[in-house]
Image (tube, rainbow, N blue to C red):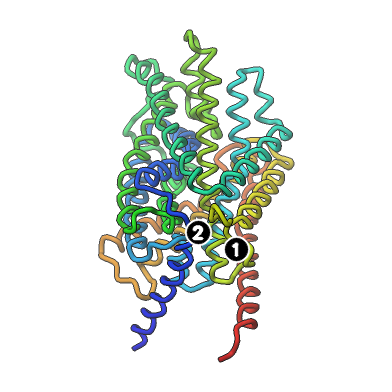
């Protein structure tokens, strides 16, 4: 029967991925996955985005959790239970929607991480500027410093990437713990002032904000933008120590979820204790808040450098986990003969894809250069960040569509409802996020640039896939 034939092909494809994954080192335990997800998902920049809403941010965080965050966890657990394979979402899309869908998903995930990595150099420069105080404000706008930091970041990521998750997981764990230390520091400064009524604006209020395009944009960012990333752990499915990969990742998702929600909600409230919404820094809001919180204290002179070191450490940890995730996507696509074979070759000792590491590193630094041509630091950061998360959102539209429409899927009603909710929240983000949430030189130009980057990536990817499929077909012997 056709159904049986389709199921046999599905199981055969799964088995081939498992055979390739057997070569990889098994480095990750449950604790590593929990801290990695905290680091992979949590972006402190979204605290600034949420703070733009003002005291009513809690009215946005709650629906963001209910309509996107929890549904995404449900869908990721469902799909990983069916297909616990190295490559995660790439494999899910390929096995349920076909190779072209899988390839474009992998391409958009790759583009997401590369664009985010290219924006991290600006974030590091911004934190260094805060560490120097008022005299260091020029650092954030210095393109030469941003480029130098970008080069150092890429070289470091490449070296760690070659060494593999045996080293990388410790950097990721340290980055996840650093996030918790930063949140504790924010609460330490903010709660006394909040309790005694000295906040710049009310940190939390249940009043509904006015309906506007900007507020809908911010809701999308606080939903999909802030909470996407549960699929990240699944990328490393072939490198988990526990043979029951699906169970380990399921547990890690539910353990990480409340920690991440706490960081976002409490962190946003802490920002508003010291800074009104209109003055929030969208690149380094936590550093801005902690610097203001320390003003007038005896430890003020030490706080800025220490906090800058912590925040930069968090950025380095997040950069590392993103980089380690993205270098595995060309590797798994190479297993399917859609990319040159050298991208899938593993280091003889560390079993890491050296060709993919080099390719991704050079591409990232190229985007650091392009992202800083002719615009200010905040605009360059927003341009790269918006384009990156739109690419990620496109992959999530595919992910949520799998339980809803893919052949071979038999999800429960709970999974279907979760998938529909996640799909609509993601679609809201895609539609609205091409518009900037900061003042830029030319809003129309900003929108065209963001749209052009996303369309160009997918058009180029579709063309490349068509050519690669043709070459592979020509080389396949006719039986």
Q: Is residue 212 visible?
A: no
Q: Which residue is mark 2?
A: 394
Residue 381 position (above or below residue 15)? above
Mark 2 residue element: helix
N-term-proximal mark, 2 vs 1: 2
* Of the pair 15 and 2, the residue shown nearer to us: 15
- Residue depicted at x 44% and y 31%: 178
Mark 1 residue element: helix
- Residue depicted at x 45% and y 41%: 39
Specify whether 240 is left or right of 157: left
- The answer to whether the residue labelled 2 contacts the one labelled 1, judged by CB atoms less than 8 Å apart, is yes
Image spot of residue 182 (x, y percent) = 44, 28
Specify whether 188 is left or right of 395: left
User: Cα distance, mark 2 to mark 1?
Assistant: 10 Å
Image spot of residue 334 (x, y percent) = 57, 66
Residue 286 position (above or below residue 395)? above
- Residue depicted at x 39% and y 67%: 402
* Of the pair 351 and 313, the residue shown nearer to us: 351
Specify whether 201 is left or right of 112: left
Q: Is residue 251 visible?
A: yes
Residue 198 position (above or below residue 269)? above
Residue that extends furthest to the front in the rendered view of this protein: 349
Image spot of residue 275 (x, y percent) = 48, 23
Residue that extends furthest to the bottom in the rendered view of this protein: 479
Q: Which residue is mark 1?
A: 458
- Residue depicted at x 40% and y 31%: 180
Please tell me how crowded label 1 is: few (under 14), some (14-19), or many (20+) other residues with Cα within 10 Å.
some
Specify whether 342 is left or right of 93: right
């Amino acid at each position: 029967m056709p159904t049986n034939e389709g199921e046999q092909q599905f199981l055969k494809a799964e088995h081939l991925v498992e055979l390739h994954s057997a070569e990889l080192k098994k480095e990750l335990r449950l604790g590593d996955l929990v801290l990695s997800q905290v680091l992979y998902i949590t972006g402190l920049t979204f605290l600034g985005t949420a703070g733009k809403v003002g005291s009513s941010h809690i009215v946005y965080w709650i629906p963001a959790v209910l309509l996107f965050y929890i549904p995404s966890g449900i869908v990721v657990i469902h799909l990983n239970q069916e297909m616990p394979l190295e490559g995660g979402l790439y494999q899910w899309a390929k096995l349920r929607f076909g190779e072209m869908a899988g390839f474009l998903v992998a391409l958009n995930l790759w583009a997401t991480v590369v664009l985010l990595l290219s924006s991290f150099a600006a974030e590091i420069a911004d934190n260094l500027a805060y560490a120097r105080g008022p005299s260091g404000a020029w650092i954030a706008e210095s393109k030469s410093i941003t480029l130098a930091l970008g080069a150092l970041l890429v070289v470091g990521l490449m070296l760690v990437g070659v060494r593999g998750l045996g080293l990388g997981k410790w950097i990721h764990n340290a980055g996840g713990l650093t996030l918790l230390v930063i949140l504790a520091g924010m609460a330490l400064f903010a709660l006394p002032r909040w309790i005694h009524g000295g906040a710049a604006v009310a940190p939390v209020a249940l009043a509904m904000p006015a309906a506007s395009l900007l507020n809908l944009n911010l809701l999308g960012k606080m939903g999909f933008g802030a909470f996407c990333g549960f699929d990240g752990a699944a990328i490393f499915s072939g490198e988990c120590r526990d043979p029951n990969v699906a169970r380990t990742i399921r547990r890690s998702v539910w353990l990480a979820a409340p920690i991440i929600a706490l960081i976002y909600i409490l962190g946003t409230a802490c920002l508003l204790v010291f800074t009104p919404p209109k003055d929030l820094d969208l690149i380094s809001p936590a550093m801005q808040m902690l610097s203001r919180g320390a003003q007038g204290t005896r430890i003020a002179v030490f706080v800025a450098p220490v906090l800058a070191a912590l925040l930069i450490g968090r950025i380095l940890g997040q950069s590392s986990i993103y980089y380690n995730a993205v270098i595995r996507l060309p590797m798994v696509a190479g297993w399917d003969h859609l990319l040159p074979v050298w991208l899938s070759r593993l280091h003889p000792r560390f079993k890491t894809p050296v060709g993919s590491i080099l390719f991704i590193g050079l591409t990232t630094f190229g985007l650091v250069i392009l992202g800083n041509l002719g615009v200010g630091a905040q605009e360059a950061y927003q341009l790269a960040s918006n384009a990156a998360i739109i690419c990620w959102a496109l992959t999530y539209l595919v992910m949520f569509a799998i339980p809803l429409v893919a052949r071979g899927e038999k999800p429960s009603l709970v999974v279907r409802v979760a998938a529909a909710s996640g799909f609509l929240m993601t679609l809201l983000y895609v539609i609205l996020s091409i518009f900037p949430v900061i003042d830029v030189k030319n809003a129309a130009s900003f929108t065209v640039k963001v749209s052009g980057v996303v369309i160009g990536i997918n058009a180029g990817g579709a063309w490349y896939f068509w050519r690669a499929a043709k070459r592979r077909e020509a080389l396949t012997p006719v039986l």
